[in-house]
Image (spheres, rainbow, N blue to C red):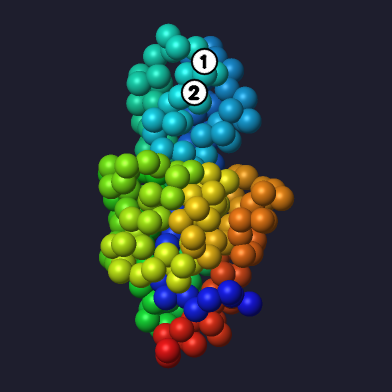
Amino acid sequence: MLPRPVRAVVFDMDGLLVDSEAVFRDAMMHVARERGHDLPLEVFLRMVGLPGASSRAVALAHFGADFPIDEFNEAVWRHARAHHDEIGVALKAGVTELLDHLDDAGLPRAVATSSSHMAVEHQLGRNGLIERFQAIVAAGDYARGKPNPDPFLKAAERLGIDPAYCMALEDSHNGVRAAHAAGMMTIMVPDLLAATDEMRERCIAIAESLHDVRLMLTTPARRASAG
């Protein structure tokens, strides 16, 4: 049972709406190996959900301060983009059905992501999803990135909804921390990172997929839209 009526839903993007985290994981590890470097999975996972500057700091702490990080990141992006151009950007299970339900319930929604607006256009635009959101909040739209609450607070502001009445959907630990700090009803839908005890404490639920989120919303969403 949801603690409050849901009047809006705020989505993360990578790993939540689109199956992109695994692509970037593979691209980063491939480029590192290609250049004679080792990138343990645990190091990559510390970057998940972080804004660019914070991810950069994690990489430099691992590779060393003199590591050519800009050249490395450009190569990773080229590799990931080539994969997307060849195969496309896959949606996570339940995305379309959940958005259809939100349309039926009259609930507005936003994206709050650590990625750039260019990445949003690349990831969501190709699937025709951008127009299905009333607000897109991306890197450059807020002062502090996740795990700070700023992206989610900005999304609530643009939607004109009190954060307490927003449901936030996240797949990463840093995203959950950000949404919880914003005071939103947070649900984690794990992708590359498993739910931990900390995540369970900060979330109102852990869902296996967005199909489960839609089922959670069914009755409360009708009540909220009717009231």
Name the image quarter holding residue 54: top left
Q: Can you say whether 100 is above or below 45 in the image?
A: below
User: For the point 40% across and 19% down, which residue is it?
Assistant: 69
In the picture as drawn, the residue positioned furthest to the top comes out as 66
Circle 1 residue: 63
Task: Kindly identify the residue that appears in the image at 62 percent across and 25 percent down.
Answer: 40
On screen, residue 86 versus residue 217, left or right, reads left
The dot on residue 104 is: none
Q: How many marks?
A: 2
Which residue appears at 46% of the width and 24% of the height? 57
Secondary-structure class at tag 2: helix
- The amino acid type found where label 2 is placed reads Ala
Q: Amino acid at mark 1?
A: Phe
What kind of element bears circle 1?
A: helix
Name the side, left or right, on which 160 lies relative to 200: left
Most extreme residue toward the right is 197
Percent from the top left, x then y, of residue 191? 59, 50
Q: Toward the viewer: 125 or 102?
A: 102
Vertical placement of residue 201 versus 162, above or below: above
Q: Quadrant of the C terminus?
A: bottom left
Residue 88 screen position, x and y as percent = 41, 49
Q: CA distance from mark 2 to mark 1?
A: 6 Å
Mark 2 neighbour density, 10 Å: few (under 14) some (14–19) many (20 or more) = many
Residue 110: x %, y % from top left: 36, 62
Q: Which residue is mark 2?
A: 59
Q: Are marks 2 and 1 in contact (CB under 8 Å)?
A: yes
Q: Is residue 170 above or below residue 102?
A: above
Residue 144, percent from left and from top: 37, 41
